[in-house]
Amino acid sequence: MEDERSKIIMVDDNRASLDMGRNMLKSFYEVYPATSANKFFEILENVIPELILLDIEMPDMNGYEAIKKIKADPRFDDIPVIFLTAKSDESSELEGFELGAADYVSKPFSAPLLLKRIENQLLIVRQKKALKDYADNLEVKVWDKTKEVFNLQNAVMATVADLVEFRDKLTGGHVARTQLYLKALTEQLIREGTYADEVKKWDMDFFLPSAQLHDVGKIAISDLILNKPGKLSQEEFEIMKTHVIIGVDAIEKIMSVTDEHAFLNHALLIAGTHHEKWDGSGYPLKQKGMNIPLEGRLMAIADVYDALITNRPYKKAFTHDDSCKIIEEGSGTHFDPVLVAVFKKVEAEFKKVSDKYTA
């Protein structure tokens, strides 16, 4: 169609040469003639061509100066420039190529040669555009596939967490609440730059959902212990504590059969270390202080707070204020003192979560 023809700006201060070139091209292209570089740049502000034919020897501003200006403007730097020249020396051509010229055509023009040179450059333009479109489309497809995998991973984690919670009838809503507590703590860390070097390495899209698996090992604990209507004996408590190792083993088995570990790395640390204590008296590894991964230290606060503010077989729910006091008293023994200070700044957010999601 006529309105789909490629646009070409032809710049030549020689009127006869300009008319001849225009007549050669007008049957195939939409040609915009310019008798000077200054006129050319006026046209360029209103017409973005697919190709520029640029004379070298012109008054005021020659072709070399003009192409420097073209290539310095990001709006135009990808447009191919074919130099028109009566020169045939190698150094002149080399200078033009170094400045970004796509090709040279000698004057006087040979119509078939000029048309073929233009056709070749426009073909390259179309190929570049097709390649860019393909790359852009591929990027969208990759993102869509990544999002699909991410959603699938989250769905699997949520389903497993639901199964655990379904069996552990005494802690309903625990998984959802602890994830929101963890979110409040982490966002405060980011706001104030606490532990910034570590937190900035995390992918929050993976980190927060991974908290759902912190008690995944409970799926292997007997119902008689998991749902005992009373305080556990020492022997039963030792069995209950094994849910940490069982959870770690389960996550590691999943990691062993997939290359997509990003969404499980955080889950592994949270599941394996959220019962460790700052003073080294926790379980299962009795890790101490900064040796406990930050993920586990954060989850410890979220997990204990939720245990305190909910009814359990061995205790009644503490008030929010009493729960906060217990956590603050555990600073430096059970909990990371730095994180307890962070907790104090967001404890109101914890209360909103507990009020909304606790039956």
Image: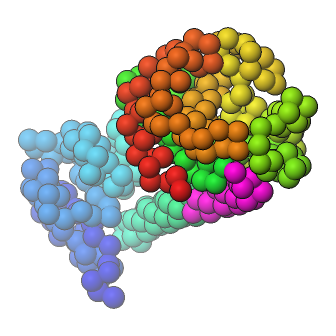
Could you tell me which quadrant the N terminus lies in? bottom left
| Viewer-side residue, 53 vs 244 | 244
Left or right: where does residue 215 sit relative to residue 88?
right
Q: Position of residue 173 (x, y in %)?
A: 60, 53
Left or right: where does residue 73 sit relative to residue 263?
left
Q: Is residue 348 above or below residue 167?
A: above
**Residue located at (8% from left, 41% from top):** 60
Q: Position of residue 54 (x, y in %)?
A: 25, 53
Total labels: the figure holds 0
| Viewer-side residue, 85 vs 240 | 240
**Magenta stretch holds residue 150:** yes
| Viewer-side residue, 44 vs 304 | 304
Q: Is residue 27 above or below residue 345?
A: below
Give the image quarter of residue 306.
Answer: top right
**Magenta stretch holds residue 220:** no
Q: Is residue 40 above or below residue 214?
A: below
Q: What range is drawn magenta here? A: 144-170
Q: Position of residue 303 (x, y in %)?
A: 61, 36
| Viewer-side residue, 270 vs 255 | 270
**Residue located at (29% from left, 86% from top):** 2
Left or right: where does residue 98 sit relative to residue 218?
left
Q: For the view shown, which residue lies furthest in the bottom direction?
A: 1
**Residue located at (57% from left, 63% from top):** 144
Would residue 344 be visible to someone looking at this image?
Answer: yes
Q: Position of residue 57 (x, y in %)?
A: 20, 45
**Residue located at (53% from left, 36% from top):** 318
